Amino acid sequence: MERKRRTSLKDLAERLGVSIATISRALRDSHEVSPAMREKVKLLAEQLNYRPNPFAQGLRTEGPKAIGVVLPNLVTHYYAAVLDGIEDFAIRNGYTVISANSHEDQQREAAAIDNFINLHVGGIIACLSQQTSQYNHFLEANKLGIPLVFFARTCMQDRFSSVTGDGDVAAQRATEHLIDTGSRRIAFIGGPNHLDMVQRRKHGYLEALRENRLPIDRDIICCDLIDKERVRQTVVALLRSDNRPDAILAFNDIIMYAVFETVKELGLRIPEDVAIIGFSDSETSRLVTPKLSVIQDQAHLQGERACDLLLRQINGDTEIVHEQIPMLLQIRESSAKK
């Protein structure tokens, strides 16, 4: 079936025998157009189901009311919740949100930033893909005067504002909880080491071990791709070793659920054989058996705060701000041996 073409300003102008500029002014209730013509234009627009193009309007006024958001993996609960927070705050302030999923790929991330530039968005919120180690695409946007705020995984903190969780503090508290409830050989499974988010959480884990005088064994600190199958292979190798860990701290929800499934596949008990705690806001964590202990990111709040920082920059604030959102430790059944 042939798709019906959208009604344009040109269509309205041709039907009424006036200029496109007159139609545009009439729809904006400009005093330059007579009340009778304004009424006539609006009636025809309604009859032909005319819908304005916000991007075209933004290009004409050089004040687009849209922001771009690029996320590494939109199907995970954390990133979906951050985006929800961004959208809630943006809508309350009259902005539209355009989101892009980099799929943890630096080239897709760079293409998304390029698209946002071409769309003349008012600003950009970004979280680095796990592959990203070059930042030229962000510098290009910055050079063009486009405000940019990072969340979770950040870079160039001397140049860009950011919103992160207090991952070092949260990881330390979670590791101390595992120690206090009977675990002694605690593994850390994280993402790529070059990500600042991984560095913060690993630092907190190591501090807890040091403060409790437990040995640091690099063989059970596994930082690799955030990939379910890769995590599964890592967990199998760890738990089939002669000196297997008795607890695992998981960097995020993808890793946590991969750990949980693999431990169960191997026939081990949670938490008696292997205690588990991970970073996640997902409701699923309390629906599985045993219920999973988690460090809650407060993802929705992170999204709201990132959007607030961006809109402040769009409105002329040039201060570089690094805001930390406290994470919440939610203890359930999967972590306490005692």
Image (cartoon, grey):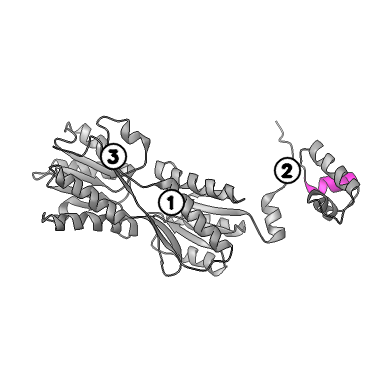
At 42% from the left and 53% from the top, the residue drawn is 105
Q: CA distance from mark 2 to mark 3?
A: 46 Å
Could you tell me how many numbered marks the image carries?
Answer: 3
Question: Is residue 10 a member of the stretch shown in magenta?
Answer: yes
Q: Of the two numbered discs 2 and 3 on the same chain, state the one appearing first in sequence.
A: 2
- Quarter of the rendering occupied by the C terminus: top left
Q: CA distance from mark 1 to mark 3?
A: 25 Å
Location of mark 2 (residue): 51
Q: Which residues are magenta?
A: 8-16
Location of mark 3 (residue): 258
Mark 2 vs mark 3, foreground winner is: 2
Q: Nearer the viewer, residue 62 or 319?
A: 319
Q: Residues within 10 Å of mark 1 (few under 14, many from 20)?
A: many
Q: Is residue 208 visible?
A: yes
Q: Nearer the viewer, residue 43 or 143?
A: 43
Q: CA distance from mark 1 to mark 2?
A: 33 Å
Name the quadrant containing residue 213.
bottom left
Q: Of the two numbered discs 1 and 3 on the same chain, state the one appearing first in sequence.
A: 3
**Does dot 1 land on a helix, a strand or a loop?**
helix
- Quarter of the rendering occupied by the N terminus: top right
**Does dot 3 land on a helix, a strand or a loop?**
helix
Q: Position of residue 133 (x, y in %)?
A: 38, 62
Question: Is residue 30 a member of the stretch shown in magenta?
Answer: no
Location of mark 1 (residue): 302
At 40% from the left and 44% from the top, the residue drawn is 78
At 18% from the left and 38% from the top, the residue drawn is 336
**What type is the residue that disc 1 sits on?**
Gln
**Does dot 2 land on a helix, a strand or a loop?**
loop
